[in-house]
Image (cartoon, rainbow, N blue to C red):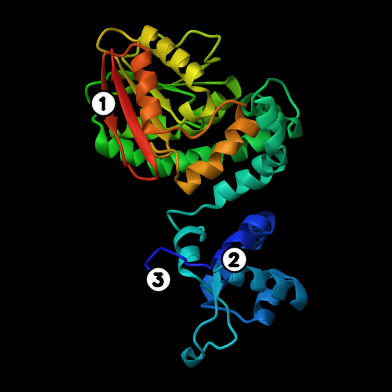
């Protein structure tokens, strides 16, 4: 078995498809009990030790351990190791499911559990109606998840914590591949909790950055931008991307993790709005999680796309880099650059006015 890969039989692959909800709950429950950290600290535990450590009876502990081991999240060491009868974390847990890991996926599990999963039972009906039927599970104003979350501050915090976590991991790829030193002031459209804007301002001490998002979201971002030096160059401008004009005076616009939310037609419309707001020589950077151009993967792209149709907006999906490039050109940008394979299945398309 190659490093970083897990091989399972066809029968087990189908079982995971059929029992996917159970597999998710096994993982979520292990995280809730902080089981992986406890196993890591103890270098492995027996069933009885796990039961005591997480405060449950022996039988439910066995159920949890059996499920996690069947999913290859836990292992039992070789009998010759002297650890017979103990469960230990597998390699994938050590890489991605320990809170101390830089690639910890806990925030993604939280958003799936608290925001997304309940809606996905409406995927088929969302396909029939071509709209986000699953939004019915979250009460509130508006016709998108982002609007509804304004009525649920705790869920909104969970949602943007995950978005910020994902952005933090991926944004370094942009900073390593694109030079922002030629820009003076950029607008971070849909900037969320400000993760990208803060990091960009830190990296480029002469750059001004404005986060443009819903008012409740800009309040979240403003709480994270309390550094005295950064606060001079960080601005928070509440507004609606469709109804309100963009802030003036910027020569760059970040269109990050927005493209997947909307239809290709609406993305082209929004990018035209960006084009119109920029001066001659201005730059629009479109950065997003992408599928491949063939439309056959990745698995992440295939599994994330139903969320956009069923819940987020009722019209988006994970698009290919070619889709992004076409929309940027159709919006009027005369010169277009494309950066593929930036890591974390992301691509960057840069339009110059």
Residue at the image position 41 percent from the left and 44 percent from the top: 169
Are the residues at dot 3 and dot 1 in contact (C-beta closer than 8 Å)? Answer: no
Give the CA separation, mark 2 to mark 3.
17 Å
Please, what secondary structure does the residue beneath circle 2 have? Answer: helix
- Of 351 and 86, the residue lying toward us: 351
Question: Dividing the picture into quarters, in which one does residue 280 lie?
Answer: top left
Earlier in the chain: of badge 2 and badge 3, it is 3
Q: Residues within 10 Å of mark 1 (few under 14, many from 20)?
A: few
Q: Which mark is residue 1?
A: 3
Residue under pointer 2: 12
Please, what secondary structure does the residue beneath circle 1 have? Answer: strand
State the image coordinates of residue 168 (x, y, percent, origin top left).
Answer: 42, 41
Residue at the image position 42 percent from the left and 37 percent from the top: 290
Q: Is residue 168 left or right of residue 159?
A: left
Q: Residues within 10 Å of mark 3 (few under 14, many from 20)?
A: few
Residue under pointer 1: 337
């Amino acid at each position: 078995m190659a490093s970083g890969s897990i091989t399972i039989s066809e029968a087990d692959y189908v079982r995971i498809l059929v029992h996917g909800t159970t597999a998710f709950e096994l993982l979520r429950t292990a995280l809730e009990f902080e089981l992986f950290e406890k196993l890591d600290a103890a270098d492995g535990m027996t069933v009885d030790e796990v039961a005591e450590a997480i405060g449950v009876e022996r039988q439910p502990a066995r159920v949890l351990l059996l499920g996690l081991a069947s999913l290859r999240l836990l292992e039992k060491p070789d009998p010759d190791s002297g650890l017979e009868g103990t469960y230990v974390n597998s390699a994938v847990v050590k890489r991605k499911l320990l809170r101390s890991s830089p690639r910890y996926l806990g925030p993604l599990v939280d958003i799936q559990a608290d925001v997304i999963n309940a809606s996905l039972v409406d995927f088929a009906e969302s396909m029939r109606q071509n709209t986000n039927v699953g939004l019915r599970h979250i009460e509130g104003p508006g016709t998108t998840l982002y609007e509804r979350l304004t009525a649920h501050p705790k869920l909104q915090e969970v949602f943007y914590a995950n978005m910020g976590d994902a952005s933090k991991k991926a944004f370094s790829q942009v900073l390593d591949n694109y030079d922002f030193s030629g820009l003076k002031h950029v607008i971070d459209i849909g900037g969320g909790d400000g993760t990208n804007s803060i990091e960009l301002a830190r990296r480029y001490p002469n750059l001004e950055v404005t986060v443009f998002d819903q008012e409740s979201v800009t309040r979240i971002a403003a709480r994270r931008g309390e550094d005295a030096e950064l606060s001079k160059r960080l601005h928070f401008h509440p507004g609606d991307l469709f109804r309100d004009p963009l802030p003036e005076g910027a020569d760059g616009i970040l269109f990050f993790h927005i493209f997947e939310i909307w239809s290709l037609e609406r993305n082209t419309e929004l990018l035209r709005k960006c084009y119109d707001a920029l001066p001659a020589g201005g730059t629009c950077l479109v950065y997003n999680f992408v599928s491949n151009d063939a439309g056959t993967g990745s698995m992440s792209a295939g599994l994330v796309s139903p969320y956009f149709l069923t819940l987020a907006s009722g019209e988006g999906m994970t698009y290919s880099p070619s889709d992004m490039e076409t929309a940027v050109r159709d919006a009027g940008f005369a010169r277009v650059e494309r950066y593929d394979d930036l890591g974390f299945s992301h691509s960057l398309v840069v339009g110059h006015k």
